[in-house]
Amino acid sequence: MVETASKVRTLKNYINGKWVVSKTSEYEEVVNPATKDVLCRVPLSTKQELHYAAEIAKEAFHVWSTVAVPRRARILFSFQQLLQQHKEELAQLITLENGKNLTEARGEVQRGIENVEFAASAPSLMMGDALPAIATNVEASNYRYPIGVVGGITPFNFPMMVPCWMFPMAIALGNTFILKPSERTPLLVEKFADLLKEAGLPDGVFNIVYGAHDVVNGILDHPEIKAVSFVGSKPVGEYVFKRGSENLKRVQALTGANNHTVVLRDADLDTAVNDIVGAAFGSAGERCMACAVVTVEDAIADAFIAKLTEKAESLKMGKGIDDGVFLGPVIREDNKKRTFSYIESGIEEGATLLLDGRERASDDGYFVGPTIFDNVTTEMKIWKDEIFAPVLSIVRVKHLKEAIATANQSEFANGACVFTKDAQAIRYFRENIDAGMLGVNLGVPAPMAFFPFSGWKSSFFGTLHANGKDSVDFYTRKKVVTARLVDPVFED
Ligand code: NAD
C-alpha cells in the first residue's frame, strides 16, 4: 500500500547498526514514477552526519579488518540466503521506486545476488602470492589487506545491482562502508541494512547516509575515507574523480554512455530486432548499457527498420507492476521534459522521426513512448548526447568499417554490439571498436560479477573497474615481505 502524502514517512540514516533521524532541514519527496504517488521523504543529510558515519566506520574497521576472512565470507553467504528469500519483495521495491517492469526488476535482483556470491569467495580472492627463492635463502611473499573506510555513491537506475557492485566485495575484503544511494531511489537499501544485520554483520561495518551533493562532498573530503566508488552521470563522475583524487583517495567512477549496435547484412534480423528493442526500450532506456544508436548497413536497412519499428510500436506501456507491461516510465518529470526536448532537437536537426514517443506519453506517470529516428548523423545532439530515455537513433552506413569509424567518434565507450554471422567481421569489430564491453549477436552485454564492468573513454574515470578481479585490487592494498631465512644449524 502506498502511503498518502500526509502520512508519508521520512527515511532515517543507518549508522552503527541503528536507524538515526537526520538533523537536516532539507528533504526531497520520493515518488513512484508510474503513478506520481509520494512514497516517502528522503533527508538530504548534512556533512556533519557524514562525518559521524565516517568516524563510526573507522572505529568498526579496526575490528572488522581483523576478523578471519572465512568468517567474513560466511556472513556474506548468510546475506545471500536472505536476499534469495526476499527476492520478490526486493523486485517489487525496485519497480515501485524506479518504474522498470517486474521481470526486469527480478533480473536486477538476480544480478545483485551474483555480486554477493562473488564476494563470498573472498578467501580465495584475497590470497596473496609467494616465491620461496628470489635469491639464495631469500623469499618473497605478497599479502593483501583492506584499505579502510570506503564510500559508495550510486545512481537511480539500478537501486539494487549497483550498490551490490560495491559493498559486498568491499566488506568481504575487510573494509567498512558508507553508502550514499540516489535520493530518487533510496528505499531498497533499507533492506540491505536489515538483512546484513540479520546475517550477522557487526554494527558500523555497513552504513547508509542519505543525501545529495553535501554528503557526496563529505565523502570526497573526509580524510578517513580512503576509497570512493561512484556510478552515475559523466559530469558528476568527472567531478567526483577529480575532487576525490585531489584529496589523494582511490577513486573509480563509472559514468555515462551512448552505446552503439552495428547490424550487418548477414545478421539474423529477427534476433537483432528482438534484442535491440529490448536493449533500447527496456528499463525505459535508463540503462548505462542501453542501445542508443543502431548503425545498419544500407543493404538491409529498410527491411531491418520496418521490422524494428513494428516491434517497437507493439510494446505494451504502463505500470511496471502490471502483467505484460514492457515499458515503464522514466524516473521524473524533468527527465520526461528533457526527452521531449531531445525529440524536438532531432526533428530540428533534420533526422527522420519514425516513431514519436510523445504521442504515447501519458500524464498518469512520467511515461514516454518508444521513439525512433532514422537518418541520424554524428553532428546531431541526439547522436552525441546520452539521452537516457527510450529514444533510438539509426545511422545508415555502407559497411562495417564505416560503422566503426562512426561509432568511434562518440566521447563515450561503454558497450557496443554487433549482429553478424561472419567470424572475420566479429574479429574486426572486436579489434577496432572503442568500447569496454562488447556483445556479439546479443543486445545488452553487461558482464557478470566475476568480470570487470569496463567502460572506456568518458564512460569511466579511474584505473581499476568495478567487479571482477579489479574490484579485489581496488578494495585492497598489498604488503610485500622479502625475507632472508638461512637454514637452521642442526647439532648432531
Ligand atoms: P547522477 O550523476 O545524477 O547521480 C549519481 C549520484 O551522484 C547520485 O547518488 C546523486 O545523488 C549524486 N549527484 C548528482 N548530482 C550531484 C552533484 N552535483 N554533486 C554531487 N553529487 C551528485 O546519475 P543518475 O541520473 O542517478 O544515473 C544515471 C547516470 O548513471 C547515467 O549517466 C548512466 O549512464 C550512469 N550509469 C552508469 C553506469 C556505468 O556502469 N557506467 C551504470 C549505471 C548508471
Image (cartoon, rainbow, N blue to C red):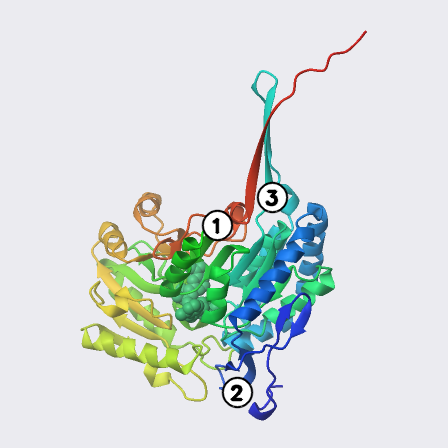
Residue at 50% from the left image edge and 47% from the top image edge = 470
Q: Nearer the viewer, mark 3 or mark 1?
A: 3
Across and down, in percent, residue 17 comes to 69, 66
Tell whether label 1 touches label 3 (CB within 8 Å): no
The vertical placement of 444 against 88, above or below, is: above
Can you tell which mark lies on residue 37?
Answer: 2
**Left or right: where 28 falls relative to 289:** right
The vertical placement of 267 against 342, above or below, is: above
Asked which secondary structure carries label 2, the reply is loop
* Separation of marks 2 and 1 at Cα, in angstroms: 37 Å
Across and down, in percent, residue 37 comes to 52, 87
Can you tell which mark lies on residue 452?
Answer: 1
| Earlier residue among tags 2 and 1 | 2
Q: Nearer the viewer, residue 400 or 77?
A: 77
Q: Quadrant of ligand 1?
A: bottom left
User: Which quadrant of the rendered structure holds the C terminus?
Assistant: top right
| Earlier residue among tags 2 and 3 | 2
Q: Which image quadrant is residue 275 in?
A: bottom left
Other-residue count near label 2 (Cα within 10 Å), few / some / many at <14 / 14–19 / ≥20: some
Other-residue count near label 3 (Cα within 10 Å), few / some / many at <14 / 14–19 / ≥20: some
Asked which secondary structure carries label 3, the reply is strand
* Separation of marks 2 and 3 at Cα, in angstroms: 46 Å
Q: Which image quadrant is residue 335 in?
A: bottom left
Across and down, in percent, residue 108 comes to 54, 65
Query: Which amino acid is tagged 1?
Result: Pro
Can you tell which mark lies on residue 127?
Answer: none
The residue to which callout 3 is attached is: 145
Looking at the image, the residue that sits furthest to the top is: 492
| Earlier residue among tags 3 and 1 | 3
Asked which secondary structure carries label 1, the reply is loop
